[in-house]
Amino acid sequence: MTKSELIDNLSLHHSQLSLRDVELGVKIILDRITEALVDDERIEIRGFGSFKLHERPPRTGRNPRTGEVVNIPAKRVPHFKPGKELRERVDQASQAA
């Protein structure tokens, strides 16, 4: 599901809200999650999951085209861990299918 599909879906299910209000709400939530991760905060949404940063150490890789050794710097990457309720609902849906 894309961001625009999410906005359209929420707008259909909550007809009392205008499309612009739904769009603004989704934008604010995603912006706040991004800001929190940039500030090295952990985000936890009960029943859904949590977001936090994982540190990847520097390593040596290879350019697949030339085979040349390339140094890859350390980086921080966002990581999502689903909550128990989300895992159970997804598992139930996959077993029913």
Image (tube, rainbow, N blue to C red):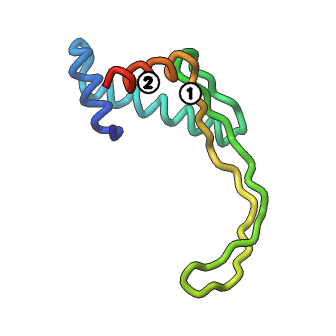
Against 13, is 67 above or below?
below
Which numbered mark, 1 or 2, is in the foreground of this view? 2
Residue 52 as seen in the image, left or right of residue 3? right
Q: The residue tagged with tag 1: helix, strand or loop?
A: strand
Residue 76 as seen in the image, left or right of residue 96? right
Task: Please name the residue that numbered disc 1 is placed on.
Answer: 82
Q: Amino acid at mark 2?
A: Val
Against 5, is 46 above or below?
above
Task: Measure the C-alpha gap from mark 1 to mark 2.
Answer: 10 Å
Q: Amino acid at mark 1?
A: Pro
Q: Earlier in the sequence, mark 1 or mark 2?
A: 1
The percent coordinates of residue 58 (x first, y second) are: 78, 63
Task: Please name the residue that numbered disc 2 is placed on.
Answer: 90
Residue 67 as seen in the image, left or right of residue 31? right
Picture residue at 71% right of the left edge, 56% below the top: 75
* Few, some or many residues within 10 Å of mark 1 (<14, 14–19, 20+): some
